[in-house]
Image (cartoon, rainbow, N blue to C red):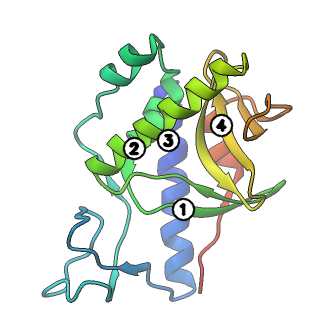
Amino acid sequence: MAQAVIDAMNGFIDKFLQTSRSINSALQIEYDPAWPSLCYIPQGSLGEAGGLVSWQPVKQHKPLIWHDFEKALDLQLHPSISTYYQCYWSEHLSAQHASGKLELIQLWNEADFERLQQNLIGHILMKRRLKQTETIFFALTEEEDFILSVKNMSGEVVLEQIGLEPKQVIAPDIASFLSSIEPVIAS
């Protein structure tokens, strides 16, 4: 299962970078010296805070540790979602699915991983308080209150409205989902 997620993520990243090159659109982001990342592409000096710099997704080489997160929630994280978040350091990635545009949540650096864990803890605690299926979000949609998540027990990808039980299964697993989307590059 983990290898299928890694392969699907590698495939999507390859398509994302090819699409960017094919339309001559460099991936750029505002430089923030207080928010370091391996994603910045060094071009001499990185420049002034707030100036645009080039970036690209970079494979993670050291596995992220979810132990404290899992222990705090007394929860075994579905392996597909932990693998997903451990593939790349990257800015969020825009994509198109048959059901609409979305943005894959990615991690910029280790501090971003800590922030993600805090947000996921809040999400899981809300789901428990509402006695709902536990999900782990991984993408934002165009609809403000809707997110894409993985059901933690089954690994299914679902569309869920925040605060409500997921009603629509989008894909049987995250690897299938990643293989079904196309990159969208802002020009």
- Between disc 3 and disc 2, the foreground one is 2
120 or 7, nearer to the observer: 120
Give amino acid for label 2. Cys
Residue at the image point whose x is 57% and y is 74% from the top: 19
Q: Quadrant of the C terminus?
A: bottom right
Residue at the image point whose x is 48% and y is 69% from the top: 17
Local secondary structure at mark 4 = strand
Residue under pointer 2: 87
N-term-proximal mark, 1 vs 3: 3
**Disc number at residue 93?**
1
Residue under pointer 3: 7
Location of residue 146 in the rendering, given as x and y in whole percent from the top left corner: 75, 48
Q: Quadrant of residue 158?
A: top right
Local secondary structure at mark 1 = strand
- Between disc 1 and disc 3, the foreground one is 1
Location of residue 56 in the rendering, given as x and y in whole percent from the top left corner: 37, 68
N-term-proximal mark, 2 vs 1: 2
